[in-house]
Image (cartoon, rainbow, N blue to C red):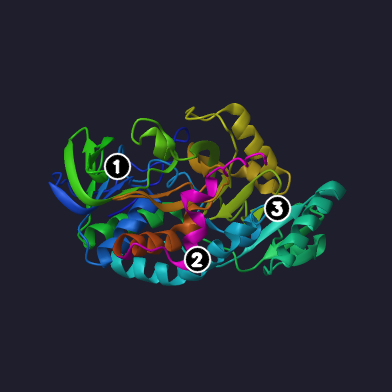
Amino acid sequence: MGLDRPVSPIGQRRHPGFALKSVPMPERADVAIVGGGLIGLACAWRLAARGLAVTVIERDTVGCGASLAATGMLAPAAEHEPGSDPLLPLAIDSLARWPGFRDDLEAASGLPIDYRPDGTLVLAIGRDEVERLRFRFDLQRRSGLDATWLNGTEVRRLEPVLRPSVTAGVQCPLDHQVDPRLVMAALAQACEAAGVTILQQSPVTGLDWSGGRVTGVVTQNGRLSAQTVVLAAGAWSGEGGLLPDALALPVRPLKGQALALRTTRQTGTLTRMVWTEQVHMAPKSDGQLIIGATVEDCGFREGVTAGGLYALLEGARRVLPGIEEMEVEAVWSGYRPTSDDDAPIIDTIAPGLVAATGHHRNGYLLAPVTADAVADLVTSGELPAVARSFTLARFARPEPKRAAR
C-alpha cells in the first residue's frame, strides 16, 4: 500500500486513494465506527487487537477530512497556552504512548511513519513578540514542561538558515512530529491486516435505535447492525441530522489552509519544527517543508484563498528567507474538529453510542490515548482515569439557583 504525493499544486493535500480492498458491507459487527480518519482508524485498530469485529464507515475516502490536511505535530509544550492546563495531562500521557504506538504500527503495517523526535523551536522577532514569548515560556515552566530560553545567537546556532532578525526563542526538546500521509497509510494497512472492514464512499445517514439503545447505523449503501457505534466523524460529528437534538455535540469545523514547499540543498531547510506567532513550519524527511496553518471560523467553506496563502508565505518569509527559492508543491485546506473548549470528547453519550471527536489541532498528538481510552470504554464500560475529564458532562450547564424564601 502506498501514498502518492500531490500531483497538483492547487487543492486538497490528498492522495489519489489508498489501495484498500473492495469489500461488501457486512450485516453486523461488534463495533461500527463512523469516520475513516486518524481517530476512527486508530480506534478500529486497537479494538480489533482486543478480538472485536470492527467495521469503519467513511462518507468519502480514508483521511479526507483533517487527517491528511494536518502537519503531524506531537507538541504538548509548544501548544501549551493559557487555559489549556486541563488538557496537559492527557497530552503528556499520549506523547508517552507514541513510541510504543509507532513501534506497533510500523510492525503491523510494515510501513514507516517518519517519527521525528527533533523538538520544537518557538521564535520571536522584536520587543513585543519577545514579551509575549516570555509570558508563554513562564507558563510552560510553571506547568512543569521542558523548555529552554534562547537568545538570537543561540537560536541561529540551532537553525543557521533563519534570519538574523530573530531575537529570541524557546526550545521544546520533547516535542515530536510524524508525517500524516505515512501514518494514515500505515493505519489503513494495519487495520486491514487485523481484519477491520473499511467501507469508503458510504455516508451514514442515521442511527438504528431499539429499546432506547443504538443498535447500528443506516448508510446510503445499506444497514449495519452493531453492539456499539463509535462516532469519530471529526468536524462533521456536530452536524445535525445524525444525532437527536438532545445528544447534539458541541463540535464545529475550524478551517485551516496550509502548503508544502520542496526544499533542496541550495535552498536549505530546517532541522526541526519552527513556530512563529504567524505560522508553524515542519520539515519532513522526504524534503518537504510544511507551512501551516490559518485559523478560520467559517464553517465548511471550501478552497484555498489568496489571502490565506499570502499570510502563510509572508509569515514564513519573516524568519526563513530561503523559502523564496523553494518550489510550491501543494496547497490545501482542511477542517479541524473543534469542541467548545478545544479539547476532545471521549464518552458514552447514549447506550451503545460512543463519541471520540473534537480534538481541535491535537488529533495526532492525542491519537494513542484516545484509541486506548475508546478500547477500554467499549470493552469494559469504563474510561481510564486520564480521560475521565473529557466526557460530555463538562459542557452541562449548572442548574440555576432558586431564590431563598
In the displayed structure, does residue 333 sit left or right of residue 223? right
Q: Position of residue 48 (x, y in %)?
A: 25, 62
Mark 3 vs 2: CB contact within 8 A: no
Residue positioned 38% across, 43% down in the render: 233
Q: Which residue is mark 2?
A: 386
Distance of mark 3 from mark 2, alpha carbons? Answer: 20 Å
Q: Which residue is mark 1?
A: 58
Query: Foreground mark, 1 or 2?
Result: 2
Q: Residues within 10 Å of mark 1 (few under 14, many from 20)?
A: many
**Membership of 381 in magenta stretch:** yes
Q: Quadrant of the N terminus?
A: bottom left
Q: Quadrant of residue 370?
A: bottom left
In the displayed structure, does residue 6 sit left or right of residue 144? left
Q: Quadrant of residue 66?
A: top left
Q: Position of residue 236 (x, y in %)?
A: 41, 37
Q: Is residue 285 visible?
A: no
| Start-end of magenta stretch | 380-405
Residue positioned 51% across, 30% down in the render: 299
How many numbered discs, if any? 3
Residue type for callout 2: Val
Q: Position of residue 338 (x, y in %)?
A: 52, 42
Q: Residues within 10 Å of mark 2 (few under 14, many from 20)?
A: some
Q: Is residue 121 visible?
A: yes
**Front residue of 206 and 199:** 206
